[in-house]
Image: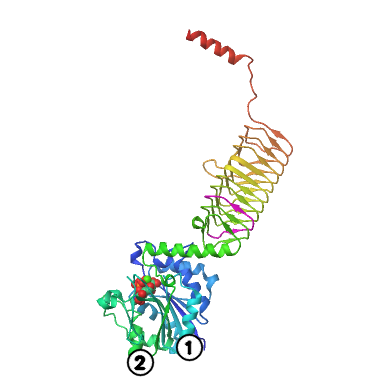
């Protein structure tokens, strides 16, 4: 028989968050709270994992569908009305007790709102439960300010008697500093038998999972309380303040992970890295850098202050100068970007490409070694290798109705202040004179110029000045 199933209860609304989004979906370092708990459950359980959903079930289910590849197999059950944590766990009975037989000897139960809980601590809890042959083992911690948590009530021999919710606690009980972390291991058969006996006769009119503790004690079964000294791990997110605290702690852990993997951070406190990001060795992150979403940064890169990279792949030895934004883009090895550049979705900067000051690139491939160094917009363009795009070049990709493409072939030279009115193509090795408005294709190796010829009038300026000073007299 398998040893441990796991139940993640995530059906509650999270009223205290004051949000239109259900609590389990609130992100921490770029991943929903529920992600952390499901990840933990899936890694420690050898049997089934069940997620109980309810409030905003459709949204939560959509997230779970997306996460299938990461965490399969797991089951999802619905708690149609949120009648309490005990009621939530009961919804897993059909999955964990098919035909009245337990799918595993024990069951780990976790709330969806304790993302700092570590695998090591949960494994300790499981081991302790087995070693003590307990029917129920719960995780607790001492808090200087226990407000909001259920209190662990022990007798004079330090044996756990029950967990009492704050709303139901006497003054004496409220003075207890040992709190329930909301993480339990319970004998599966006992769990569902006991839950059937839980009543909602309490201050909140809910079916409390915590009542199972008292029921076990009343039956003379063995209950163990494992107290951890790492109370941060037990932090349950009920409010935005808690969420901010957890965010800070998770970010701190993520930074430690990358510092230990050989990444330099000049000001780690202002470096924001989502849990979804990977970073290569010897990359240097300057103050205020944000790396988010599905972003992979190669080794030996330098990313300077106040730059943000979202859902992008960045190769090796790439330099991103200050205050640049890179979104849904691919940047190959040795490319350089910025300062003040905006690399937008669909941009592909090939090896050693250069994008400089105040340049915007969207849905455009910029070939190897090509440069757009100043004040340029490249949208819906395909630019070949070793192309030079002069300052102030604009691809006019939108005619008010539809977008068209601009193609610039290898080795072409686009003079400064050029407009390329798409659809248009500049052939291999062609030169476009500066100040041109190009509306027709330019053949390979040709020169195209569209500005009017220069007019020069000798001595004109001097005569003007003389005229003016006459009049002023
Ligand atoms: C719970 C515990 C408390 C403990 C604390 C630890 C109970 C009765 N209380 O309180 O002893 O100190 O966690 O953080 O269990 N949920 C459902 N369905 C429901 C209600 C809740 O799935 O009907 C889920 C929530 O989505 C959440 C978890 O259960 O993930 C805990 O609910 P929450 O309301 O945060 O419980 P606490 O008041 O924090
Ligand atoms: Ca909670």
Per the rendered image, the range of residues in magenta is 293-306
- Please identify the dominant SS of the magenta region: loop
Instruction: State the SS at label 1.
Output: helix
Examine the image and state in which quarter residue 316 appears: bottom right
State whether label 1 is within 8 Å of ligand 1.
Answer: no
Residue 294 falls within the magenta-colored stretch: yes
Residue at the (41%, 63%) spot, across then down:
245
Percent x, y for residue 423? Answer: 62, 42
- Few, some or many C-alpha atoms within 10 Å of disc 1 (few <14, some 14-19, many ≥20)? few
Instruction: State the SS at label 2.
Output: loop
Q: Is 462 in front, or is 256?
A: 256
Ligand 2 resides in the quarter of the picture at bottom left
**Tag shown at residue 448:** none
**Tag shown at residue 220:** 2
Residue at the (64%, 15%) spot, across then down:
458
- Few, some or many C-alpha atoms within 10 Å of disc 2 (few <14, some 14-19, many ≥20)? few
Percent x, y for residue 444? Answer: 73, 39
The residue pinned by badge 1 equals 131
Of badges 2 and 1, nearer the viewer stands 1
Q: Is 97 in front, or is 439?
A: 97
């Amino acid at each position: 028989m398998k040893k441990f199933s796991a139940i993640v209860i995530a059906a509650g609304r999270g009223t205290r968050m004051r949000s239109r989004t259900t609590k389990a979906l609130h992100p921490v370092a770029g991943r929903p709270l529920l992600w952390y708990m499901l990840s933990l459950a899936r890694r420690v359980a050898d049997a089934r994992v069940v997620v109980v959903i309810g409030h905003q079930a459709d949204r939560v289910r959509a997230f779970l569908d997306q996460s299938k590849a990461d965490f399969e197999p797991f089951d999802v059950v619905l708690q149609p009305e949120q009648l309490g944590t005990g009621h939530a766990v009961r919804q897993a009975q059909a999955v964990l007790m098919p035909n009245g037989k337990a799918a595993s000897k024990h069951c780990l139960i976790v709330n969806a709102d304790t993302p700092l809980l570590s695998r090591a601590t949960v494994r300790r809890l499981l081991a302790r439960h087995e070693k003590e042959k307990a029917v129920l083992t719960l995780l607790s911690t001492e808090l200087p300010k226990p407000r909001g948590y259920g209190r662990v009530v022990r007798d004079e021999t330090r044996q756990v008697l029950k967990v009492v919710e704050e709303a139901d606690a006497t003054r004496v009980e409220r003075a207890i500093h040992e709190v329930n972390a909301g993480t339990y291991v319970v004998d599966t058969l006992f769990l569902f038998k006991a839950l059937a006996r839980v009543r909602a006769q309490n201050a909140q009119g809910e079916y409390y999972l915590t009542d199972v503790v008292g029921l076990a004690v009343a039956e003379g079964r063995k209950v163990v309380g494992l107290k951890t000294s790492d109370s941060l791990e037990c932090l349950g997110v009920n409010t935005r303040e808690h969420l901010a605290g957890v965010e800070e702690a998770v970010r701190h852990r993520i930074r430690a992970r990358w510092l230990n993997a050989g990444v330099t951070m000049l000001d780690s406190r202002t470096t924001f890295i989502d849990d979804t990001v990977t970073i290569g060795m010897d990359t240097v992150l300057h103050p205020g850098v944000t790396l988010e979403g599905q972003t992979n940064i190669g080794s030996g890169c330098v990313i300077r202050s106040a730059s943000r990279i979202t859902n992008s792949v960045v190769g090796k030895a790439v330099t991103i100068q200050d205050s640049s934004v890179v979104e849904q883009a691919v940047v190959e090895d040795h490319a350089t970007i910025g300062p003040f550049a905006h690399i937008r979705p669909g941009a592909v900067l090939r090896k050693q490409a250069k994008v400089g000051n105040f340049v915007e690139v969207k849905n455009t491939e910029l070939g190897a070694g090509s440069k757009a160094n100043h004040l340029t917009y490249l949208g819906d363009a395909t630019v070949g290798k070793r192309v030079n795009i002069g300052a102030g070049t604009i691809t006019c990709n939108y005619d008010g109705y539809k977008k068209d493409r601009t193609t610039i072939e290898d080795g072409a030279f686009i003079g400064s202040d050029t407009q390329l009115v798409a659809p248009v193509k500049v052939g291999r090795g062609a030169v476009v004179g500066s100040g041109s408005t190009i509306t027709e294709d330019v053949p390979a190796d040709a020169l195209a110029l569209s500005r009017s010829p220069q007019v020069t009038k000798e001595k004109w300026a001097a005569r003007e000045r003389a005229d003016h000073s006459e009049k002023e007299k």
